[in-house]
Image (cartoon, helix red, strand yellow):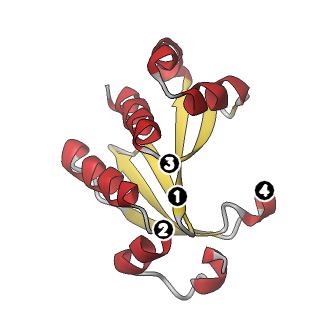
């Protein structure tokens, strides 16, 4: 079942419902890391955007620090995606970092076109290596 069908705009999920739907320890690990490392709180928001076949539609979790977006997590059944926007300010460091990133991250970064001031990386967080890459890209945004 689609996330947006389970929890429509009037039916906000709890953290536990989100965690159960995703079913990945990596979800908890990333959320805990962002809270502890940067002192940020998750903010549940709803999007009714139907672009990309409704990928963006539904409840998701935003993490911001000082008004600046660090990343947004999109729950999917059995997995989740992290949106990290690599802006012009972080681009040189991100490109230098790619040599030590997972192949998946390198390929995604290489094929993602810049738009609206940066590369909008939608990363499927399916293993520890990709989780590490998300953490490292987020770190560029706060340094």
Looking at marks 2 and 4 on the same chain, the residue that comes earlier in the sequence is marked by: 2
Disc number lying in front (4 or 1): 1
On the image, numbered disc 4 is attached to which residue? 52
Q: In the rendered view, would you say 100 is above or below 118?
A: above
Residue 117 seen by the camera: no
Q: Residue at x 33, y 45 (%)?
A: 65
Separation of marks 1 and 3 at Cα, in angstroms: 6 Å
Separation of marks 1 and 2 at Cα, in angstroms: 6 Å
On the image, numbered disc 2 is attached to which residue? 22
Secondary structure of the residue carrying numbered label 3? loop
Q: Residue at x 55, y 21 (%)?
A: 88
- Marks 1/2 in contact by CB < 8 Å: the verdict is yes
User: Is residue 133 found left or right of 55 in the rendered image?
Assistant: left
Q: Residue at x 66, y 83 (%)?
A: 5
Relative depth, front residue between 120 and 20: 20
Separation of marks 2 and 4 at Cα, in angstroms: 20 Å
Q: Quadrant of residue 27?
A: bottom left
Residue 125 got which mark? Answer: 3
User: Is residue 115 found left or right of 41 in the rendered image?
Assistant: right
Secondary structure of the residue carrying numbered label 2? helix
Q: In the rendered view, would you say 99 is above or below 139?
A: above
Separation of marks 4 and 1 at Cα, in angstroms: 16 Å
Q: In the rendered view, would you say 55 is above or below 11?
A: above
Separation of marks 3 and 2 at Cα, in angstroms: 11 Å
């Amino acid at each position: 079942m689609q996330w947006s069908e389970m929890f429509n705009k009037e039916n906000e999920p709890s953290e536990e419902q989100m965690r159960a739907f995703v079913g990945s320890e990596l979800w908890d690990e990333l959320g805990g890391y962002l809270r502890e490392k940067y002192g940020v709180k998750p903010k549940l928001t709803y999007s009714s955007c139907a672009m990309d076949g409704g990928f963006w539609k539904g409840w998701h979790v935003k993490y911001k620090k000082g008004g600046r977006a660090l990343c947004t997590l999109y729950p999917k059944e059995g997995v989740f995606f992290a949106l990290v926007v690599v802006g012009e300010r972080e681009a040189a460091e991100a490109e230098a970092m790619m040599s030590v990133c997972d192949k998946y991250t390198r390929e995604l970064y290489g094929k993602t076109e810049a738009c609206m001031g940066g590369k909008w990386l939608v990363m499927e967080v399916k293993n520890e290596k990709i989780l590490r890459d998300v953490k490292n890209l987020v770190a560029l945004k706060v340094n």
